Amino acid sequence: MSKHFDLMKLARGARAALIGAAVVLLATGAASEAKDEVRVAGLTWPGYGFWFIAQEKGLAPDLDISYQAIEDPFQTFGLATAGQLDIVSSTIEFAPIAAAEDMPIALVAYGNISYGTDKIVVGPGIETAADLIGKKVAVLEGGLAQLYMAIWLEQNGVAYDQVEYVNLIMDDAASAMIGGDVAAAEFWDPFGPQVLSARSDTRLATDSRQDFWLKNALIADAVFMRTGFIEENREVAEKAMRALYDAIAWWSENPAEGNQIIAEHMKMPLADVELVIGTDGTGRDGGLYPYSFIEAARFCGSAPGEPPFGQTNGQINDHFRMTNEWWIKFGLMSKTMDPSDGIDCSLLANLHGSGYGQ
């Protein structure tokens, strides 16, 4: 699955491409007249499957929530910009790009943090990051994989531009690593373990469960909303967020049934769902940790207290600035945006103010 954005395409004329995406039709089904429609889209990824639990368990009885699996995030955000989607579940690094392109999209919540599912694997002869200087490394350019690799290199004394980035989707990156065509690569599960198993002379250099990555909160999924949806249907938008967090809470108490629901609706093997989000409902026995409402509200600065993993209240703004700076380094953005241009934490603030999640 492709978890990255074609940022160069966006930077060269996002507006026209996004309007063009409006011709794509979504099969949403007939909604009951008594229910408010909420159109959600995202990748085929277990971390986004909580929307199906909200549907299946009737956690939002007055909402008709539909989830459309779209594997191209560029297309997904194009549909949202064109008014054909209300909510997008996607990786978080798109927020500064949306702001810079003046897209009617707002980052409204931090969703799931990578808790080991993302890995950097190195090949034979690579003992330190310095051994990668001048060599090829496989990443999905324009996404978290590239940022993860770049920050890890600099963390270990190698400038981000001292390696040659090779833009490969996960299947191809795994093949390139196994075939010896690249010296290192960034993977998410199940591809990292597959490479490590296939070649005994490869090794794990780092994974996203390390304290450094958990604290800086870089590698994560998020919830985006169309700003028109928030402005015109604020009560519905708040109900949708409440349904999502009710679903996460329900899953934490019923992980076996919840995982089965996600697997069936995502059309994924149950084992893959369990590998990513775990089996005991804690979020700490898999590769992805879903944030509860109060954790997400604290990360947004919408509730008092500290988020998990040593993060700070309101850290979503620092995350925005960090990714903005890196996109400028990579030449995918040309200006610094203010977090307020791309973030709207008011829905979580309103929910917290109403007593929800306390």
Image (cartoon, helix red, strand yellow):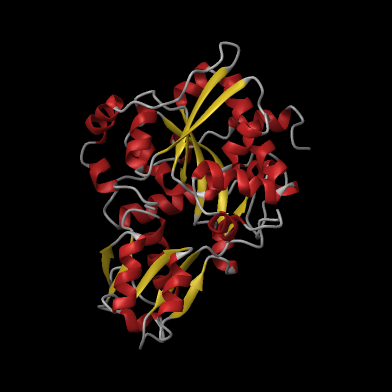
Picture quadrant where residue 246 is located = top right
Residue 356 % position (x, y): 74, 32
Asked whether the viewer can see residue 172, the reply is yes
- Residue 5 location (% of width, % of height): 34, 48
Residue 54 place in picture, x, y as percent: 63, 34
For the C terminus, give its image quadrant.
Answer: top right
At x 71% / y 57%, what residue is drawn?
280
Residue 229, relative to residue 323: is it above or below?
above
Can residue 306 be seen in the rendering of this structure? no
Vertically, is 328 above or below 200? Answer: above
The residue nearer to you, when weighing 132 against 57, is 57
Q: Residue at x 65, y 60 (%)?
A: 309
Relative to 255, 316 lies left or right:
left
Where is residue 172 drawn, in percent x and y?
30, 64
- 257 vs 137, left or right, is right
Q: Quadrant of residue 76?
A: top left
- The residue that appears at 36% across and 45% down in the rendered structure is 336
State whether residue 136 is above or below residue 79. below
Q: Is residue 344 left or right of residue 354?
A: left
Asked if 195 appears above or below 14 in the picture, the reply is: below
Nearest the eye: 99 or 54: 54
The outermost residue toward the top is: 33
- Residue at 29% x, 72% y is 176
Instruction: Indicate the quadrant where residue 171 lies.
Output: bottom left
Q: Nearer the viewer, residue 21 or 228?
A: 21
Numbered marks: total: 0
Horizontal side, residue 272 vs residue 163: left or right: right
Closer to the camera in the image, 211 or 279: 279
